[in-house]
Amino acid sequence: MTDIKLCKDCKHYKKDWYARITGYGDTFDICVNPHLIAVNPVSGKTKGDFCDTMRKYHGCGMEGKYWEARK
């Protein structure tokens, strides 16, 4: 059996509590991995993206390339 690297077990995972209590589940949970987040060149603020978007389209991939275990 292969170990699956789940976003919820990654240290870069941020749960969206509002989506959970309104019935959207984990749809809007965010990845805040510094390798993958966007930096606004004007303000310097960072912005993560949805976990599923990061896994599908932005470098982490379905294999969880940037996955790191929570402590």
Image (cartoon, rainbow, N blue to C red):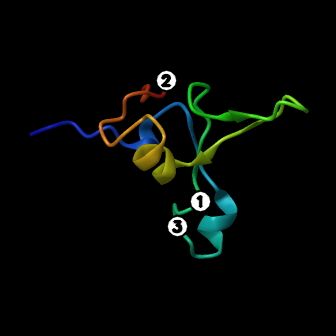
Q: Which residue is mark 1?
A: 28
Identify which amino acid the numbered label 3 is placed on: Gly
Task: Give the foreground label among 2 and 1.
Answer: 1
The residue under the point 26% across, 40% down is 4
Q: Which residue is mark 2?
A: 71
- Under circle 1, the secondary element is loop
Where is residue 15? Give x, y as percent: 60, 50
Q: Quadrant of residue 41?
A: top right
Identify which amino acid the numbered label 2 is placed on: Lys
Identify which amino acid the numbered label 1 is placed on: Phe
Where is residue 19? Give x, y as percent: 64, 66
**Depth order, front residue of 45/28:** 45
- Under circle 3, the secondary element is loop
The residue under the point 50% across, 51% down is 53
Q: Are marks 1 and 3 in contact (CB under 8 Å)?
A: no
Q: Which residue is mark 3?
A: 25
Where is residue 29? Give x, y as percent: 57, 53
**Depth order, front residue of 38/30:** 38
Q: Earlier in the sequence, mark 2 or mark 3?
A: 3
The residue under the point 64% across, 34% down is 37
Crowd around label 2: few <14 · some 14–19 · many ≥20 (10 Å): few
